[in-house]
Image: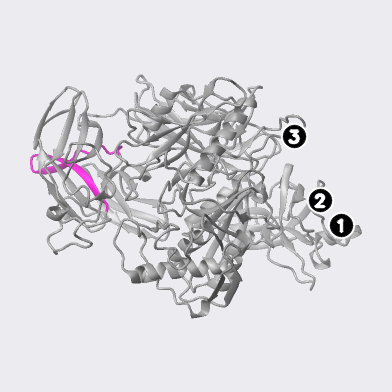
Amino acid sequence: MLRRLKAFVEPRQTPRFTALLFALLCSSAYGFAKEITPNKALEIAKRYITPAVVAQKSRATRATSAAASTPFYLYNDKRGQGFVIVSADDVMGEVLAYSTKGSLDTTKLNPEARFLLQQYREVYRALQQYPQTKSRALVASSQTDEVAPLLKSHWGQGEPYNQQTQYVTGCVATAMAQLMYFHQWPKRGQGENSYTVAFDHTQRTANFAASEYAWKQMLPDYLHVSYTQQQANAVAKLMSDVGISVFMQYTSGASSASNYAAAQAFRNHFDYDVAMITKQDEGTSHFLEIVQSELRKGFPLYISGNSKNNAAGHAWVADGFDRNGMVHMNFGWDGQADGFYSLSALSLSTSGKEFNGRPLAFNRQLMVMAVHPNRQGTPPIDEQLRENAPNLAFTIEGDMHFTETPPTTTGTEAHITINHFTNQSSQPFCGDLGIGIFSADDSPVRICPSTFHEAGGYTVSRFADYGGKMSPSALINGDVTIPLKLSGLADGQYTLSAVACERHASGDFGSWTKLKKAPRIVFKVEAGHISYLEMPSTAPTFQLMAAPTFDKPLYSGAKNTAHVMLRKLNALPFDGVVSLEFIGSDGQPAATFTTEKSVDFEMFATTRITLPLSLPEHLTPGDYELRLSVIKDYTQETCIVRSVNMQAPTHVNVEQRDQRNILFSNVLGIVQDNSGESIPADRIDQRTTPLFKIGCIAFSREQAEYTGPIMLQLVDDEGKRSINLKTIPDAISLNHEANTLQIMSGWLRASDLKIINNRDYRLTLTGKQGDKVIDLWPEDVAPFIVSIVNGPYNQYPDNGPDGIDEVVQAADVRFNGGLLEVSQEGLQRVAVYHPSGILVANKVIKGQNHVAIALPRGLYIVKITTQEGSFTKVVR
């Protein structure tokens, strides 16, 4: 339960960057620290951006050494299209943060940005002192999981948001307001509030029931567009009401409020269902699972953390995550520094080692608030997340198993035994234990309570001498055996989980919720017969949660990246490197790849592992079995990983790549102003840069052969338009030599192009083979996105023909539930991009005509590759 959370958000100076990197969750875990050199850091940064020639570095002095050292490297994209912060110690993870938009100027950082960088420095210094320290491995529940940022707003705390507060609005109010704008709820508030601001002794009063919020008048961005006073009033009224609802203490330099006040205001004044969840209670893995689950369902979260000794607090919004588990943060300062952040760097562990009698820890207080509008059709928050839900968790010796031989039919009598769990709440637990049977979508099918249920619950018997209550920190280390009823289960997949329910003073029982940090049993029923897909173990055991995926098709002699999901099926420590073997038809390894660093696996949790690999040139094309194993640190004990669902091993096909039709190995988009200098492609300001060029630098492959025309285009995937650009040169000739080509448009004006403000345009490069238009942009290169602000058009001035129809083919692309479905004859590959250019999903298909990708509904650019070539479609 949440559990007397002291979550006061303290004052600070100006913008809200965030105290982010708290002890949230996870990233790769490493057993042996290795410093990252500047050259290596630059290499890492190039995976995300095109760095400027001179990289910015943080300058810090190591506390334990006189030698100068740097905890991280900061690189800005030379075109202004993002930034990346690379760690100087791989124990913190290689990449600490990145964005595909904007830049970070170290001379103009807001106080929260400075705070964040200082937290990195603290951890880095501690790592130099205690090199045994590890960070938690990244946890996720699906190989293809990723949610593009949900918020469209990039609000701040100054003008026009503070027109009715006279002071900066405060991070709590800004986070709340952005969440409310996302949900467009409520139409009007309820109740009223009145209080005195200590700084200037003014009385602040609001009758929320009299406030009608003009959602349609509010804009997602006020910084880069012109707005009316009516539009300013709409957002200023919201900010003022939210501030008053949380008793915001305004000052000339900062404004502060508490998380508790935010939760109460959401509930009592704005008609939201709210639950507060802490990392400390849930454990690192489950905490991230909760965050990702809410985001998958389309609910961004309020997130807050406190710095060392609770000296300062920060609040912002988490609204997405990438396939590597990095969480997208909207900090509430006009988009400044918004991006994907690793939250592992301040969540370090020592794997049981202690120093001076105390464990080394960097776990700052971190909490999230799930916020759902009480609107018809909106699902309520899971009872599991409620503050008053039972807070029982398994310990490091925790176990769950069938008391007898596991049943093979639903008609067999069965019992489950659980042991070693504790009450981690600050309140006593009085109630019952049981086993829940949950369907594949995690819906409860049946609860099997203990045999003490009718007598008041398990604790009434077990803790009879203590008033029938299990006190805080109490431990049950003996066996608790619970009868299991499997009869009548329909065909399907089920999960058995330990559950608990509170017994109220009235004698009634509350909702059943799962124990935390817990084992589970997964099985399938077919015509009354049971087959098991996952079973916990008391011995070191790991299991694949999904077949490994790869960024690209597997080709001999080519580099690739494997993405693996491993679940640890017991609680005792077993950390080590992960090995991936390609087993040939002779049963012998034909190629072996091992993680560079040791992975720190959390008990009963699923860990995402990214493994770069380079297949040997001599690897014979054909079918290979994949075999994974975990090799324990120090002892070299090897644990072979179970296959998915404990079924047959995964097989992959390695091909010999035909590269004759691939002309370019890479293409870099560029924008130049009228002086010829490169400028950011995002939000080109037409007031200061009315004349510009767009183009690219293309790197041809040595084997490339092509003679013919080329064409640059700007494609509006949302509005389904394409705009041909004058292309210089308009034809090229490639003759088996590696060349670097600069391909540019003529001089452009937004008024002549008739492109509209704040619209993303994708640059394309095409050629021709006979009468057929071919896409020359490499399929592995992210789209290059161009946009303008302060131009003459907010909508297209004509209804002319949509040139995009000349390029787009007739593929059927649509959402069906939580799936993006693509139907097209002869599919080879489907790549899905966020309009910002971030690769969201990548599916390699060979010759199929249909593919379904798990994605939340949203606006995406879908690049479809068939046997006939590539084309794009937009879907929303």
Label 2 element class? loop
Horizontal side of 297 relative to 745 (left or right) equals right
Query: Residue 463, which numbered label?
Result: 1
Q: Say which label, 3 or 2, has the lower sequence index.
A: 3
Position above or below: 222 against 768: below
Q: Quadrant of the N terminus?
A: bottom right
Horizontal side of 816 relative to 401 (left or right) equals left
Which region of the structure is painted magenta? 760-781
Label 1 element class? loop
Q: Amino acid at mark 1?
A: Phe
Tell me if label 1 and label 2 are in contact, CB under 8 Å.
yes
Way the structure is coloured: one colour
- From mark 1 to mark 2, how far is it between C-alphas? 10 Å
Q: Nearer the viewer, residue 735 or 300?
A: 300
- Residue at 80% x, 63% y: name it: 457
Query: Residue 358, which numbered label?
Result: 3
Measured as percent of width and height from the top left, residue 582 is found at 46, 27
Q: Amino acid at mark 2?
A: Ala
Q: Nearer the viewer, residue 545 or 383?
A: 383
Q: Say which label, 1 or 2, has the lower sequence index.
A: 1
Mark closer to the observer (3, 2): 3
Horizontal side of 276 relative to 722 (left or right) equals right
Query: Residue 474, which numbered label?
Result: 2
- Residue at 39% x, 25% y: name it: 615
